Image (tube, helix red, strand yellow):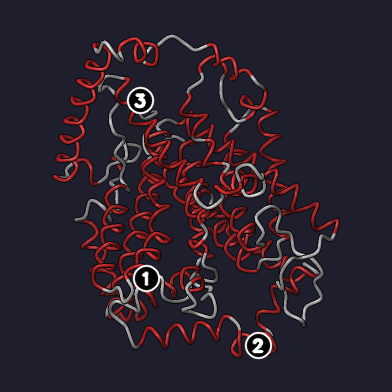
Amino acid sequence: MEFKKSLKSSAIVGWFSKLKSLAKHSLIFNVSINKDNKGREYKSWKETSIVFSILTKKDNFFRNIEKNIKIQLLNSKLTGNIFEKLFSEKKNKSNLLASSKLLQTVGIDAKVIKWNQVLILLPTLYVLLDYLIRRIPVIMRLGSVWDEMLLLLLAIIYIFSRIKSGGKVRFNFTAMDLPIVIYIILGVSHVLIKAPDIGIAIEGFRSVFQHILWYFIFTQYIKTIKDSEVVINGMLSLGLFLGVHAVYQYIAKVPMPGNWVDTAENISTRAFSIIGSPNILGVIFVLFIPIGISMILTKKNKFQRLFYITATIFMIAGLLFTMSRGAWLAFAFAMAIFTIALVPRLIVPFAGVGAGFVLFGGGLSERLLYMLSPVYLMKSAAGGRLYRWAIGLELWRKNQVFGVGLGRYGGAVAMNNNLTPFYLDNYYLKTLTEMGIYGIAALSFLIVSFIVFAIKIIRTTSNHYNKIMAIGLFSGAMGVLAQNFVENIFEVPAMVVYFYLAVALLNCYANEKDVV
């Protein structure tokens, strides 16, 4: 009783109680649902928002324009014949390509092929495409711009599909649209407020915000659960390939191209596959593995389950062989969320498995425990992460509100412009240093919006399949956010794309039925 009284009188508890009270009256942050409402359709800010009402009217306005454009193109003497063929609803003979075994393995039904499903597989295989483009002589010059070209191409194809439909295709508004747009606007305003060098500020802005735009492409191409399964199967196929390759590298003891271990550690190799970095390869597995486990739990077809089990096992093995301590801890965090959300009573056995790994993991556990050794802490404070973090914090203290400016410290842009001697290896600290309290508050708003968005979906759905898939996507994404504490994960374009792909996929499980 005394404990409860002291808890109630606590200033911290009182502060959280006020936040909870405010959240209950917010359409973005409220996660509470009545018992009799459980299983109802997911509700968000869209249902009563004036902003959404305005955006819907604007979308209707553009749909009318698209309808008129189609009429004009078909009636034109110059373009009529051309666009009549382009707008034809008859299936093109090239659709026979869909019957290939390759497309069938990623969930595309040859009888009901949708080209949006084929197109969206391209960014899904981002790391593989990037690797190939940068090594094929004919197209290697596109290595730094191919993703921007693909983003623009998919946007143009989407606009063309709206015109082709005669204004029938609606923009797929989602619950995360508003928080993401607000975050981008805050980023633009920061450049206007704090930009010692406008060129570097714009470059820094691009590195942070450009790849977030993929979210809006994903939500227009991935609208149904069938669409999401095609993408997920593509992700897990890639994950299987990366896992097998990582295992091969570890067994073959492929030399490490960089100085990735401390001189005090007895480690000869770390798996990095085609990614080139063990830490980034590890975080890809952190995102993909919970999704693979969700597919194992939801699919009944033996051959499908065999594929998901195989992919998940190789990804777990690949994760271990990356020797990435940050990825291991992020994975443990992700799986703890997965377990608590799905079967809370299994959290104790899960913790036991984790403890067993630490105690009896051999060389793997030794690498993890090395972080707690006096030698590691001393070296880290002298020139490692702790040292870099201390410098970043000291720099922030001199520029607390708006930081030093985007692209000016602790990241790739700053390194390329010789403004910093190292990466901060903490994306949140980098954001705080470059954008100050203003920027970290903006990023926190976005992250909290995502967490609330995902929790709402998980809590409101009564569909077992939808719930497990939502938990897998949410857990993997949370693992990525966790690893950002020890790496600049969002400095890597592929990881930004994959993270927002997972957020976009979550939308498909918001309601009991497919979105149309």
User: Where is residue 333 shown, x and y percent of the image?
Assistant: 55, 62
Residue situated in front as seen by the camera: 100 or 41: 100
Q: Quadrant of the C terminus?
A: top left
Mark 1 or 2, nearer chain start = 2
Instruction: Give the residue type at disc 1.
Output: Leu
User: Where is residue 499 shown, x and y percent of the image?
Assistant: 48, 52
Q: CA distance from mark 3 to mark 2?
A: 57 Å
User: Where is residue 173 shown, x and y percent of the image?
Assistant: 29, 39
Element marked by disc 2: helix
Residue at 52% in and 53% down: 144
Element marked by disc 3: helix
Q: CB of mark 3 within 8 Å of CB of mark 1?
A: no
| Residue 108 horizontal side relative to residue 136, left or right | left
The residue where tag 3 is placed is 161
The residue where tag 2 is placed is 379
Q: Quadrant of the N terminus?
A: bottom left
The residue where tag 1 is placed is 406
Please name which of the two marks, 3 or 2, marks the residue nearer to the observer: 3
Mark 3 or 1, nearer chain start = 3
